[in-house]
Image (spheres, helix red, strand yellow):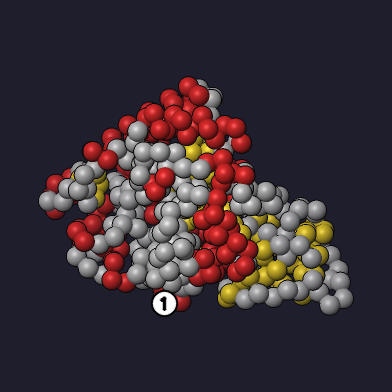
Amino acid sequence: MSATTKTLIRGARILGGEPQDVLIDGETIAEVGLDLTAPEGATVVEADGKILLPGLVDLHTHLREPGREDSETVLTGTRSAAAGGYTAVHAMANTFPVADTAGVVEQVWRLGREHGYCDVQPVGAVTVGLEGRKLAELGAMADSAAGVRVFSDDGKCVDDAVIMRRALEYVKAFDGVVAQHAQEPRLTEGAQMNEGVVSGELGLTGWPAVAEESIIARDVLLAAHVGSRVHICHLSTAGSVEIVRWAKSKGWDVTAEVTPHHLLLTDELVRTYNPVYKVNPPLRTEADVMALREALADGTIDCVATDHAPHPHEDKDCEWGAAAMGMIGLETALSVVQHAMVDTGLLDWAGVADRMSFRPAAIGRLSGHGRPVSAGEPANLTLVDPAYRGEVNPAGFASRSRNTPYEGLELPGQVFATFLRGKATVMDGKLS
């Protein structure tokens, strides 16, 4: 990464507004205005009207280290994140060993600090070993150097209502949040795809929408009962949207995320039997996709989270039934959101900043990120060329894995530059 002391970004459209200049001095934005003079020795970046956003924040990233370094490492995952415009990611707990102790979360946090392409905020497990039977060391992880504030058994649902209640009660003490993978396990045994017309025609075991919606309904009620925060991971159905909308109308502290792939792809793609489309929760119907887009636009869904789930080639290049679930998404997320939300008129660039930086940082209680692009703020920034159009080619990805559902698809937008505390991790579309 380049370590230039001063950088002048000339002619950037902050949150899509009129072009302005932004002067970075060290780790901080020193000045924002028109016709700023570049200090002696400063690097000048000609933005030419490109969009300047606060650095993106992902609430839901699988970095796989420790234990599955064949899929991803903290180094490759943070390089992938930087390439996608992210300056901070929340690393999920389903590693080997599971991040259910202060020692493991500190290991992940220190690896993130060591590699430096983006900040890594570990997510702690809710239960020991993700087994759903006993609460993990929530307080110890919160008090550790990593300062964990988000807890999730993602990959598995905390399906025991008593355990979920206790977790919600526990995290109140340090303003934490439980992020739930909403999936009633008995309703999804052997499930291979969304339950519906397509699953019936293909003869594949279906994953019904009610398996997600029933857990969300239970958990928003539990959160209201104990006065705690609950966050719903990877919302995927129109019914789930309505439950979250109802909970928010009650004033309950409920937030939710949607993935880029659930904003764009449908279960019709499963007809190809290409395992790249196998994901949990599964791709849903066109009606669900439209409902998710509308809910993200009106704020019912708070943020976009990638659920970046890398897998080695052999775990995806096999028959559908044996394939692992998951897609990578860090390097394509912003392009998919531009395609599905901005280019359709559902969100403007200020809305993108809100859903992909401000709100996820606030939910994760992540300081230094999700801040306004103004003088005195940390220089965590993403410069985007919205006019770019290009075909997705995973061969050029920084991620160790290649399981993207967008290969060969033309998508808009390119991350031109990413700055982490004033240092360019990406410049001219290339990692520094």
> Residue 24: x, y in percent?
78, 64
> Three-letter amino acid code at disc 1?
Ala
Placement of 395 over or under 383, stated as above or below = below
Q: Nearer the viewer, residue 389 or 4?
A: 4
Placement of 351 over or under 76, stated as above or below = above
The residue shown at (41%, 59%) is: 96
Q: Nearer the viewer, residue 377 or 61?
A: 61
The residue labelled by disc 1 is 395
The residue shown at (38%, 46%) is: 130
> Residue 77: x, y in percent?
50, 66
Q: Is residue 351 visible?
A: no
Q: For the image shown, how many numbered marks are present on the structure?
A: 1
> Residue 206: x, y in percent?
20, 45
The residue shown at (46%, 76%) is: 396
> Residue 343: x, y in percent?
49, 55
The residue shown at (16%, 51%) is: 204
Kindly state the secondary structure of the residue where label 1 is placed.
helix
> Is residue 224 shown left or right of residue 162?
right
Of the 4 image quadrants, the one containing the C terminus is bottom right
For disc 1, the neighbor class at 10 Å (few under 14, some 14 to 19, many from 20) is: few
> Is residue 353 shown left or right of residue 319?
right
Q: Nearer the viewer, residue 140 or 181?
A: 140
Placement of 361 over or under 401, stated as above or below = above
Q: Which image quadrant for residue 132?
A: top left
Placement of 217 over or under 87, stated as above or below = above
